[in-house]
Amino acid sequence: SCKGFYKSLNLFDEVYDIEWNPWRSTMFGSVAKDGRLEIWDLSMEANDPIFTDPEDLKDKELPARKTIKFSANNPIIVTGDVNGDIKVYRLFGFDDSFNMPDK
C-alpha cells in the first residue's frame, strides 16, 4: 500500500519553530535557519505559503529566526532571530474573519 508523503520545497534550511494561529484554525507560520518566515493558510493554498519574508533568499545571508508567535487578540505575528532582533507583522485582509475569544 502507498502512504501519503508531503515535502515542502519552499524551505531551504532547518525549521526552528512552527505555531498554529489561535484564531484561524487553517493558518500556521514557520521560521527557519535561513532567516525565512512563511505563513501558510491551508484553506487558501495547501501547496505554497501565502506570505514569505524575505520573498527571495538569493545571495542573502540572514540571521536564523528562532521563534514565531501569533497574537491571541489581534492579527499580529512576532518573530525573533538569533541576534535578539524582533520583527512585528500585521496580517491584512483577515479582520472580517477575526473573532476574538470571549474573556
Image (cartoon, rainbow, N blue to C red):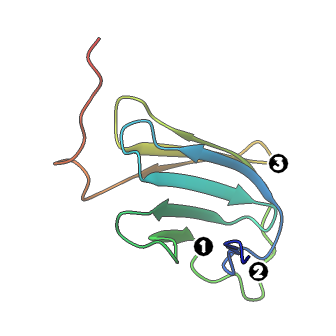
Q: Which mark is residue 86?
A: none
Q: Amino acid at mark 3?
A: Val
Residue at disc 1, secondary structure: loop
Q: Residue at x 78, y 77 (%)?
A: 12
Residue 40: x and y in percent read 49, 63
Farthest top residue in view: 103
Q: CA distance from mark 1 to mark 3?
A: 16 Å
Can residue 61 be seen here? The reply is: yes
Q: Which residue is mark 2?
A: 60
Does label 1 or label 3 sit earlier along the sequence? 1
Tell me which corner region of the image, top left, top right, bottom left or bottom right, holds residue 63: bottom right
Q: How many other residues sit within 10 Å of disc 1, few (<14), some (14-19) or many (≥20)? A: few
Q: Residues within 10 Å of mark 2 (few under 14, many from 20)?
A: few
Q: Residue at x 82, y 48 (%)?
A: 82
Q: Are marks 1 and 2 in contact (CB under 8 Å)?
A: yes
Q: Amino acid at mark 2?
A: Lys
Q: Is residue 43 above or below residue 79?
A: below
Marks 1/2: CA–CA distance: 9 Å
Disc ID at residue 54: 1
Q: Secondary structure at mark 3?
A: loop
In which quadrant of the rendered image does the C terminus lie? Answer: top left
Q: Residues within 10 Å of mark 3 (few under 14, many from 20)?
A: some
Residue 9 % position (x, y) = 69, 81
Residue at image position (59%, 44%) is 19
Q: Could you tell whether 12 is left or right of 46 in the image?
A: right
- Taking the image as shown, residue 71 lies to the left or right of residue 102, namely right
- On screen, residue 86 above or below 2: above
Q: Amino acid at mark 1?
A: Pro
Q: Position of residue 3 (x, y in %)?
A: 71, 72
Q: In the image, which disc is placed on residue 82? A: 3
Which mark is first along the chain, 2 or 1?
A: 1
Is 39 situated above or below 103? below
